[in-house]
Image (cartoon, grey):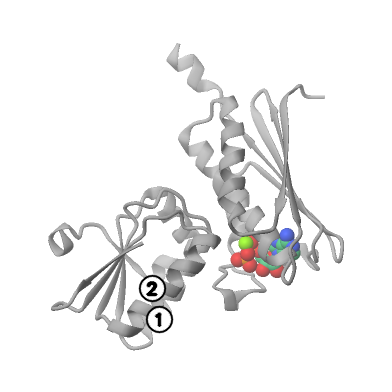
Amino acid sequence: MNVKHFIEDKILLFEFTEELDHHESEKIRKRADYEIQRFMPKKVILDFKKVSFMDSAGIGLIIGRYKSTNCYGGNLELVNVKPKIKRIFEMAGVLKIVSIVENIQGQTG
Amino acid sequence: MRNIKNEMKLEFLSKSANEAFARISIAAFASQLDPTIEEIADIKTSVSEAVTNSIIHAYPNKEGIVKIRAVLYEDEIEIEISDTGIGIENVNEAKAPLFTTKGNLERSGMGFTIMDNFMDNLKVESIVGLGTKITMGKKIKKIKDENTY
Ligand SMILES: Nc1ncnc2c1ncn2[C@@H]1O[C@H](COP(=O)(O)OP(=O)(O)O)[C@@H](O)[C@H]1O
Ligand SMILES: [Mg+2]
């Protein structure tokens, strides 16, 4: 996972580079919560561009990070979510609480 | 009886590092049936769900053995994933969407729902104290050949 801080805008970007299964999610969530609690960003962006695999562990990972940002009033956004992954989120109703943003090129490019 | 084209078995310790190993191995074996990328993705995700369940639910406080058997037929793959762990008390309840006994560990309770959706058939057999066996099958369609050649 690559982590980028946009200090002025108070945005934290996590770019997942691993396969999002139970094994990898355990490590990601520790690192992500550490960064979120330290930086208290207004917005956390989760970038799925480099995710080649995700199972239901990804659902828990996203809902967990929603909780860690929502608890102090921060926002969570998902970007570059491929159809296969989107289908898994839809099955679990994740998109009712977290939104997918289609294009963030301008924001983080 | 259907004609068996090929068969394989795999056994490993219930370590989470083996989740990727298991799904990649089965995907490689399934590729003999010339599946689409979509079909391979469905198989990988379902294998990952069942194997993860054996690792985290079947053997909560110790390590155990997870076994996989995969059989290739002319137009279908059948995969059995089994453990000798704690077993499931109520299988119908366990299969319901969002049901989990490990919510504290960020489990979503969507594992069985995903297997059910991504595979063509799913059977769950479990005996408390003895273990669990998941059998799932997926048809690998042959139309691609006719179109390509
Ligand atoms: N191999 C297994 N051994 C024991 N219990 C299991 C096994 N697989 C699933 N379960 C039970 O079924 C429940 C639902 O499984 P699943 O749909 O994959 O959701 P999750 O893994 O997120 O809890 C689990 O919480 C667990 O209680
Ligand atoms: Mg599961």
Q: Image height check: is A101 above or below B23?
A: below
**The disc labelled 1 sits on which kind of residue?**
Ser
Residue B104 drawn at (x, y percent):
59, 79
Q: Residue at x 35, y 84 (%)?
A: A37
Indicate left or right for A40 with A6 as reference.
right
Q: Image height check: is B64 above or below B122?
A: below
Q: Quick check: marks 2 and 1 in contact, CB under 8 Å?
A: yes
Give the numbered dot on residue A32: 2
Residue A19 drawn at (x, y percent):
45, 54
Quadrant for residue B53, please give it.
bottom right
- Secondary element type, mark 2: helix
Residue A89 drawn at (x, y percent):
45, 60
Q: Nearer the viewer, mark 2 or mark 1?
A: 2
**The disc labelled 2 sits on which kind of residue?**
Ala
Mark 2 is surrounded, within 10 Å at the Cα level, by few (under 14), some (14 to 19) or many (20 or more) other residues, namely: many
Q: Residue at x 50, y 17 (%)?
A: B145
Give the numbered dot on residue A68: 1
Name the image quarter holding the C terminus of chain B.
top left
- Secondary element type, mark 1: helix
Quadrant for residue B34, please give it.
top right
